[in-house]
Image (cartoon, rainbow, N blue to C red):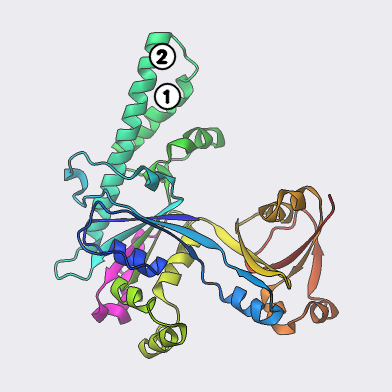
Amino acid sequence: MKLGIIGKPQSGKTTVFNAAASKQEAVGDYSQASHRAVIKVPDQRVDTLAKLVKPKKITYAEIEFLDSPGFTGKGKKTDKFEINPDIRLMEALILVVDGFSSDADPRADIQALLDEMLLADMALLEGNINKKSRKMKLTGDKSETRELDLLKKCYQWLEEEKPLIDLELNETEAKSLKGYQFLTGKPLLFVINVSENDIGRTDEIATESADLVDAGKCDITALCGEMEMELVALETEERKQFLKELGIATPAVEKVIQKSYALLGLISYLTAAEPEVRAWTIQSGTTAVHAAGVIHSDIERGFIRAEVTAYDDYLEHKTPAALKAAGKTRLEGKEYVVRDGDVILFRFNV
């Protein structure tokens, strides 16, 4: 999973990046700085299975974060600006907005960022529409007429100040547009970066803007980036104690990851054996045979069956033998739809 972090200068986006990636990049008004990191996704299920199985290797799911420059925060009033092209390659975007300063206006900042995303997409569309129109006029080649019409349709949609994620497309149209990587076509997570004084009010602050939430498209959360950045510098036990004292069950950065997974429709299944305990990320709704292909194409090609155990049952019975004796491990075929937290052993023959 690839997540891009954007925001106005001094919104705390690099602070949030540091907290998520356990980095110590310079923070402040460094609007042209770009940072990248790949992190392991915290997963208590992996940790618990590892204690039971005692594998030689533990592998967590991974996320790539890109802290991107390029947004002015001026919204429609901005002059022409350039964005880091890599931000278009991200699967979802995290919009960090100021909720800590005395004159903070998170909703206005969110709208300004959305406006700039819309303008960036319109510029991209305009360039491609002009290019294809000239080519058709000069060569007489009409092969791209359908795609040109689709681009014009997208441009008109954006002119109405509506994001492309809300534009209904058929499968062919969606496939045709995929290569453009439009910013307004990506799921968004709004992160309100609050002060330490508001740590106890993060849920309340997020709820105040709950009208922005749109399942599968937009979600919102609030956190204190400065405190979260300080947390990652602590040792594990010290961090747990600090969170306990604050009455926080889960670090906010983990909530950001969970919400990002949900926005993208992602889940994890687990494999547990002596060589390795591992989390595998798949799209919700993936069948067993295609989930097997995430591990290796040979397993998908030679798929025989999947031995599936619910994580909670594994937690209760602890060993494969006890699980089978209790009838908690079942055999599933190719069309079984994998559930989040399934512990699976694939049987295959090639």
Quick one: SS at disc 2? helix
Q: Secondary structure at mark 1?
A: helix
Q: Range of the magenta residues?
A: 191-214
Chief secondary structure of the magenta span? helix
Q: Quadrant of residue 46?
A: bottom right
Residue under label 1, please give it: 148
Work out whether residue 96 can be spotted.
Answer: yes
Q: Is residue 42 magenta?
A: no
Q: Quadrant of residue 280?
A: bottom right
Residue 193 belongs to the span the image colors magenta = yes
Position in image of residue 350 (x %, y %): 84, 49
- Specify which label sits upstream in the sequence, 2 or 1: 2
Residue 51: % across, % down: 65, 81
Residue 82 in the image: above or below residue 73: above
- The relative height of residue 28 versus residue 304 in the rendered view (above or below) is below
CB-based contact (under 8 Å), mark 2 and mark 1 = yes
Name the residue type under label 1: Leu
Q: What is the crowding at mark 2: few (fewer than 14 residues within 10 Å), some, or many (at least 20)?
A: some
Q: Looking at the image, which is closer to me, 10 or 210?
A: 10
The residue at 48%/67% (across/down) is 258
| Residue drawn 58% across the image and 62% down it | 267
Q: Give the side of residue 251 with respect to residue 42, left or right.
A: left
Report the Cα–Cα distance between label 2 and label 1. 10 Å
Where residue 278 appears, as percent x and y from the top left, is 64, 67
Foreground pick, 232 / 252? 232
The amino acid sitting under disc 2 is Met
Label 1 crowd (10 A; few <14 / some 14-19 / many >=20): many
Measured along the vertical axis of the image, is residue 136 above or below residue 273? above
Q: Is residue 258 left or right of residue 25?
A: right
Q: Which residue is mark 2?
A: 136
